[in-house]
C-alpha cells in the first residue's frame, strides 16, 4: 500500500510517501525555524499561516520525489494530535481534501506513536515488546511497547520535557532557537564535568528537569554577567550531560526492571549526538540492544506518520471526514 503522510503539528510542514509501511519513497520538510527564531520560540498564529503557504508545495514535492502522481496514492495518513490546533488543522484539511477528491481512505495518527514508528523505516527493526523513550520538545516518557497501539507508561516527566530543558537553556544563554541543535554543537568543545548540575529524581524512573533549568538561572544571576565565550562550551556540555545522564540511566533501568532487552529512542532530542553515543555505550555494557532512527527521522517528519498510518489502514482502520484535531492525546489514557 502506498501512503501519503502529512505532518503539521508544530513548526514543520511535512509530507512523505511510504510504501508498505517501511519503504520511504520521499520525505519532504519545510521548516519555519527562521521565522520563529526571531521570537525565540514558536508563535502558534504565525505557524498556522506558514503551514497554509507551505502545505500544497510540500505535498507536490513529496509526490515528485517519489516519482508518483496523486492517482497512485492508496491512502492518506495525517497527524491528528497532540500539537497546536491551528497547525494541525492545516494538515488535516489538506488530507481530507485529497482523500475526498481521490476517494481513498484517510486515517488520523498520533504524533507520539509516529515518533516510535519511525524505527520501522530503518534496516534493523526491533520485534515487540520493546521499551521506547519518546523524548521531544513536548514529551519525555518511557513506554513499554507491547505492539502497535499497545503502550504502558513506565516513567514520565513531572514538569518540563527534555527538549524544553534544552530550548530554555539556550534562551537563557542567548544561544538562539531552537536550542537543542545549538547546545549539541557547542557542547562538543566543552568539558562535561566543569559544572555540577543537578540530576532530578534519582530514585524514580520519572523525570524532572525544572530544577536543572533553575540551577542554570541561579548560576547566571549569581554571576551578574553572561558567561564568556570561553566558558560557554563547558556550561552547555555540563548541562547537556545532566539531561543525558538521567535519560539514559532511567530508560535502561526501566528496561532491566521489566526484563526487556530492546530499547528504542525517538523524538527530536534523540537526534542529540551525546545522547546517541551514551545510549550505545551504556546499553552494550548492560546487554541491551539500542535502536535509534537516523537524526532526520527523529525530529518531526511525515514519513513516520505514513508508516503508522499505513499500518492502521492495512488493519482496516480509517476515519471519516469529521476527523478533528486534538491538542492533547496521551498514548495511554
Ligand atoms: O520531535 P520534535 O522535532 O518536535 C516535537 O514533537 O516537540 O522535537 C523538537 C525538540 C526541540 O526541543 C529541539 O530543541 C530538540 O527536539 N532537538 C534536540 C536536537 N535536535 C532537536 N535536542 C538536543 N540535541 C539535538 N541535536
Ligand atoms: Zn515530534
Image (cartoon, helix red, strand yellow):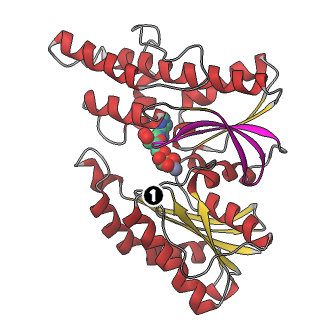
In the image, 213 versus 330, the foreground residue is 330
Reply yes or no: does residue 150 show up in magenta.
yes
Task: Residue at 28%, 62% (x, y): give it.
Answer: 46
Task: Residue at 42%, 72% (x, y): give it.
Answer: 90
Q: Is residue 17 above or below residue 104?
A: above
Q: Quadrant of the N terminus?
A: bottom right
Q: Which residue is mark 1?
A: 327
Q: Secondary structure at mark 1?
A: loop
**x and y percent of residue 125 in the render?**
80, 46
In the image, 85 versus 27, the foreground residue is 85
**x and y percent of residue 4 in the render?**
63, 73
Reply yes or no: does residue 18 show up in magenta.
no
Chief secondary structure of the magenta portion: strand
Q: Quadrant of residue 224?
A: top left
**x and y percent of residue 54 in the render?**
40, 71
Q: Is residue 314 above or below residue 171?
A: below
Task: Residue at 58%, 77% (x, y): give it.
Answer: 64
Residue at far left of view: 224
Left or right: 301 as drawn, with respect to 44:
right
Instruction: Give the residues in magenta.
Output: 129-154
In the image, 256 versus 102, the foreground residue is 256
Q: Quadrant of residue 163?
A: top left
Residue at far front of view: 333
Amino acid at each position: 500500500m502506498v501512503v501519503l503522510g502529512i505532518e503539521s503539528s508544530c513548526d514543520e510542514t511535512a509530507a512523505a510517501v511510504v510504501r508498505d509501511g517501511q519503504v520511504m519513497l520521499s520525505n519532504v520538510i519545510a521548516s519555519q525555524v527562521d521565522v520563529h527564531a526571531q521570537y525565540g520560540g514558536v508563535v502558534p498564529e504565525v505557524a498556522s499561516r506558514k503551514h497554509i503557504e507551505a502545505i500544497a508545495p510540500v505535498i507536490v514535492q513529496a509526490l515528485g520525489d517519489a516519482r508518483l502522481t496523486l492517482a497512485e496514492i492508496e491512502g492518506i495518513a495525517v497527524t491528528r494530535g497532540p500539537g497546536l490546533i491551528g497547525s494541525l488543522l492545516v494538515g488535516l484539511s489538506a488530507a481530507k481534501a485529497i482523500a475526498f477528491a481521490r476517494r481513498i481512505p484517510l486515517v488520523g495518527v498520533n504524533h507520539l506513536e509516529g515518533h516510535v514508528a519511525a524505527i520501522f523505516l530503518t534496516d534493523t527493526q526491533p520485534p515487540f515488546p520493546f521499551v521506547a523513550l519518546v523524548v521531544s520538545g513536548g514529551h519525555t516518557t518511557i513506554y513499554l511497547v507491547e505492539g502497535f497501539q499497545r503502550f504502558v507508561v513506565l516513567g514520565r516527566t513531572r514538569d518540563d520535557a527534555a527538549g524544553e530543558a534544552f530550548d530554555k537553556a539556550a534562551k537563557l544563554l542567548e544561544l538562539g532557537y531552537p536550542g537543542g541543535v545549538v547546545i549539541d554543537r557547542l557542547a562538543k568543545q566543552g568539558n562535561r564535568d566543569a559544572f555540577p548540575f543537578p540530576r532530578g529524581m534519582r530514585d524514580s524512573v520519572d523525570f524532572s528537569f525544572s530544577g536543572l533549568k533553575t540551577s542554570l538561572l541561579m548560576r547566571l544571576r549569581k554571576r551578574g554577567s553572561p558567561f564568556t565565550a570561553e566558558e560557554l562550551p563547558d556550561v552547555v556540555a555540563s548541562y547537556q550531560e545532566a539531561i543525558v545522564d538521567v535519560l539514559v540511566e532511567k530508560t535502561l533501568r526501566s528496561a532491566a526492571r521489566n526484563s526487556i532487552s530492546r530499547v528504542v529512542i525517538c523524538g527530536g532530542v534523540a537526534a542529540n549526538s551525546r545522547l546517541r553515543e551514551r545510549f550505545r555505550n551504556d546499553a552494550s555494557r548492560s546487554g541491551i540492544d539500542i535502536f535509534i532512527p537516523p537524526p532526520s527521522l527523529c525530529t518531526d517528519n511525515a514519513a513516520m506518520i505514513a508508516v503508522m498510518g499505513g499500518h492502521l489502514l492495512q488493519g482496516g482502520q480509517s476515519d471519516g471526514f469529521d476527523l478533528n484535531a486534538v491538542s492533547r492525546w496521551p498514548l495511554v489514557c
